[in-house]
Amino acid sequence: MNKKLLVFNWKSAPTTVDAAIKLARATENYLKSLKPKTQNLKPNVVIAPPFLFIEEVGKFIKKVKLGSQDVFWENLPTGKGPYTGEISLRQEKNLKVKYIIIGHSERRQILNETNEMINKKVLATLKAGLKVILCVGENLLIQKRGKKTIENFIENQLRKDLKNIENLKLKIENLIIAYEPIWAIGTGRSDSPEDAVKMIKYIKEFSIFNFQFSNIKVLYGGSIDGKNIKKFVKYKEIDGFLIGGASLKPKEIKNIIKSII
Ligand code: PGA
């Protein structure tokens, strides 16, 4: 079985740097204390804190890798730029960020982030040598229209978000897709493992057929916790999980990591 990837997306929590350090420490220490039967079972864990806490969290983690929840697409040679409120790739790289979550549905829906913007971020991040976690997923309205409509919707997102990717010298391990049905995010109602696997397989097949990406990693995200993760981990098609709410609770973190090894 392949090593699973766990990405902890803290979103806009916690509210203080002390709480962020405490949480990062709890995750790091638990990971360190594990003695899996084989080293290969120890998951790769990424924490994506709010920008504000990235630097401090970075000081306390060794086993855990650092992620961020977004980035700005313009990557000027100076690393600076007149982009009020935005964080540049150079700034993130300097803080030792390795993974960048791009196109999360909360950004697409609440902040009107478009596929065109997401595409620019994906290309710039890959060019800079960092890893992209590209989020795709359908809303409830689309889900209700059935499998074919969901597939068409995801295909459209992938085509637009990955436009011109063939012009890059892509290392496939730098591109990770996260399938996150919007109706399952933060609702406590995850997708069924069987349906999630079907979509993940579809995304993998589509990626081979369209982009010639074999071996692309695809994660599942949406209301995963320390309990329901057990039903998902047995599927080899699911390469890992993008986890929001549960990644803020030390007890859940332990149960999540424990169920992988
Ligand atoms: P959730 O969030 O685990 O709280 O559903 C997942 C996500 O938004 O990535």
Image (cartoon, rainbow, N blue to C red):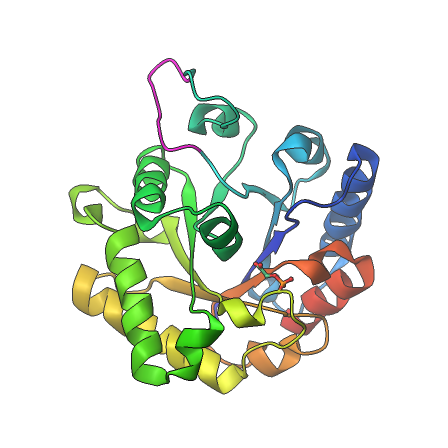
Work out whether 236 lies above or below 77. Answer: below
Whole-percent x and y of residue 260?
63, 70
Work out whether 89 lies above or below 235. Answer: above
Left or right placement of residue 147 versus residue 83 in this view: left
Residue 155 appears anywhere in the view:
yes
Residue 42 sits in quarter: bottom right
Whole-percent x and y of residue 1?
49, 73
Circle count: 0
User: What residue is at 48 percent from the left and 29 percent from the top?
Assistant: 93
Left or right placement of residue 109 versus residue 55 in this view: left
Residue 78 sits in quarter: top left
Closest to the observer, 193 or 43: 193
User: What residue is at 55 percent from the left and 42 percent from the top?
Assistant: 67
Is 50 within the magenta? no
Residue 253 sits in quarter: bottom right
Ligand 1 quadrant? bottom right
Work out whether 126 lies above or below 95. Answer: below
Residue 204 appears anywhere in the view:
no
Tell which residue pokes out farthest to the top in this image.
78
Whole-percent x and y of residue 116?
29, 45
Q: Main secondary structure of the magenta part?
A: loop
Quarter of the image containing the C terminus? bottom right
Left or right placement of residue 106 versus residue 51 in this view: left
User: What residue is at 50 percent from the left and 28 percent from the top?
Assistant: 87
- Range covered by the magenta-colored residues: 72-79
Whole-percent x and y of residue 209?
18, 69
